[in-house]
Image (cartoon, rainbow, N blue to C red):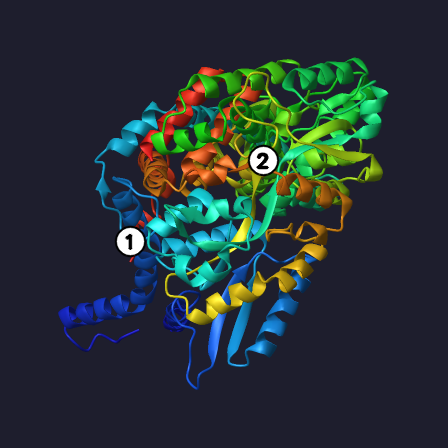
Amino acid sequence: MNSGRRNPRSRALRGFTTILLFLLPALVLFLLLVVAPIAVAMYTSFFKWNGLGGLPTEFLGLGNFERLFGDPVFQGDLWHGAVLIALSLVVQLPIALGLALLLNQKLRGRAFYRLLFFAPYVLSEAITGVLFMMILEPESGLANQILQVVGLGGLDWFADQSTVLLSLFLVMLWKYFGFHMILYIAGRQGIPNELIEAAQIDGATGWKVFRHVTLPLLGPTIRISVFLSVIGAIQLFDLVWIITDGGPTHSSETMAVTMVQFGFKRFQVGYASAISVVMFLISLVFALGYQRFVLRRDLQGATTVLRDQR
Amino acid sequence: MTVCRRSAALLAVSALILGGCSSTGSEGGGGGSSAAGKVTVEWWNIGTTEPLKTVYATAVKDFEALHPNITIKNVATENDAYKSKLTTLTQSGKAPQIFHTWGGGVLKQQVDAGLVKDISSEAAPWLSTFTDASLAAYQFDGKTYAVPYDIGMVGFWYNKALFKKAGIEEPPGTWTQLLDDVKKLKAAGITPIALAGKAKWPGHYYWAYLAMRIGGLPALQKAGTDKNFNTPDFVAAGQKVKELADLQPFQRGFLGADYDKPGGQAATMGNGKAAMELMGQWAPAVEKSSGKGIGDDLGFFPFPAVEGGKGTVTEAFGGGGGFALGADAPPEAVEFLKFLTSDAEHRKAVGSGGVLPVLKGEEDAATDPNLSVVAKNLASATGFQLYLDQAYPPAVGQEVNDSVAELIAGTKTPDQVTQAITETAKSE
């Protein structure tokens, strides 16, 4: 922009002030709406506080965290999170990937199918929740009616401690596979056809092409998709809140649900803050670790090395 | 250059957002009175549905006609939204000038935080017009913090036709008879009881009523102040709940059932698919709105007595609604409360079917036959216990709901229930 008539230092300074000036509004918002609440939650997590009246006064030290990790409900939350993450990775991602590759073929009505499979993702969580509550209602729901016609007894779905988590995953699968599918389709379209053709000329069959060309080149997309699945499962709230409220008997409760229960129903805001801090730390450690070790190659030449590009 | 322009746009947007933030914090609390002797009083209530919506609107209009210098700002919010809206405001250390309250532990917390006005002396002239049962939820340490507007009680609503089909002549008067009737209903292929396991609070009615019948009202109050539920009476109450649950009297999938959603407790009962439900005075209305409603087949009987228990069948369990004042509410707010709960005015609300009588000698104003039964039961009640999830601090109430739900689901024993509740009570 500027035609270097002044010395470099003052130019750098001016550049810096400009950057600061333009960054300021965003920075203020970020500090006010993101950093400050995190700091406040961390502060209150050390207190016994019901959130009413003035500031917290009853200092507990790490008391809330000790109670947290000794609580079977919270241990259950961690377990449910792990199960949902495992199911997402083992079941949801392969399905999404398979459909993506299928819909990348030249077949009739391809755009329609893509739209159809992506549609659940556009629905709000609340609507999805209510929809599946009706479909999976044990007494007169659609799913059990169909199962009865086929001659099977039907399940209790969300009403049974042993099936509720799987039923919940079923809803998550239906809701989010379309999103991952679109990610994969986009990733697949980024792979030049020349590579595939070259492999085919070299005599590679369908599976070999997939295993040695498509899959490695989809690596960055898969890694991002895994990342989003895991973070989503850690933060899972709305579907559970609407469909099961964490029940029956805490068997589908997630960390976020427990947090809301304690913060807004029991008014133990200090304890709820402790849960939120743990959730934040788990997400943070995972996000940083994942970016550091798994995404390192994908991020090269991106945000982390901005200076070299100039 | 495009970069610059984009940043400028961002700057402008940010400024707008920031500006927007700074201009909001004037809601509720504080301000109200203005110049020229005109006073505006804000009234937070949950009258978003008929008939109360009209009753409230008319009351405001009539009151303003009588007091030209006072303007009542009628802020109606839907029940659940109201709770979170009020919580958000109270957490910032403020309270509305007049606000709907259910009394009990939540109100007590707000009182302890200094957010609620003590109206003992202001309301003294007309406090004696209320029935004792209706006032109980709003009085702590001999001081009154709200005036009642509605009161109700929980009892068994039953389907007379289904009872007859199972060969049951009259509703049970004792716990043993109730269990017998449950067996008879099951034998006749009828689901005896509808229960919303997901919602949890309907389940706590069983445990609470049994504790009342076995230990008597003083036991529940004592447990609240001593923070000790580890007594034989409470364990016995849990055992009786388990006794009932072991008969598997509830509808299929009750653990996932909500109260007023499709397929929930009210719909199951309202569609004639279960013989009874333990629910408050609103049950007939909700049965009709979420199911078909069972009309004249619907009957009411109070929670049966337990043989050898210290409580009696005439002690009622329930709750109501009333209006409290924010700590800095103007005297005009008291004036409005007095008007709202005057005999002539409150009779209109009762007559509309929206609330039940809270004033002495007002029972005849309830015209709906179902509500009239409840009103009569309440008028002759010899004792009154507020819902446990409201009587005790919120955390204790929620723990009661949670633990009893686990008891019914079979994942907690009666001992573990009382232990869990005691632990939570001690941690408050």
| Quadrant position of residue B384 | top right
In the shown orientation, is residue A25 left or right of residue B36? left
Q: Mark 2 lies on which chain?
A: B
- Location of residue B375 with respect to B6 vertically, above or below: above
Q: Which chain carries label 1?
A: A
Quarter in which the C terminus of chain A is drawn: bottom left
Q: Which of A23 and A102 is in front in this view?
A: A23
Q: Can residue A234 be seen in this view?
A: no
Q: Judge left or right: residue A158 versus residue B43.
A: right
* Drawn side of residue A287 relative to residue B204, left or right: left
Q: Residue at x 58, y 42 (%)?
A: A182
Q: Where is residue A55 in the image (x, y as percent from the top left)?
A: 27, 51
Q: A79 or B227, which lies in front?
A: B227
Identify the secondary structure beneath mark 1.
loop
| Residue at x 33%, y 23% (from the top left corner) | A70
The residue indicated by pointer 2 is: B316
Query: Which quadrant would the N terminus of chain A be assigned to in this image?
Result: bottom left
Residue B65 position, x and y percent, is 60, 78
Tell me the amino acid under the disc marked 1.
Gly
Badge 2: residue crowd in 10 Å (few <14, some 14–19, many ≥20)? many
Helix, strand or loop at label 2? It is strand
Q: Which residue is drawn at 31% across and 45% down?
A: A41
Q: Position of residue B174 (x, y in %)?
A: 65, 20
Determine which residue is flagged by label 1: A54
| Callouts 1 and 2 on one subunit | no
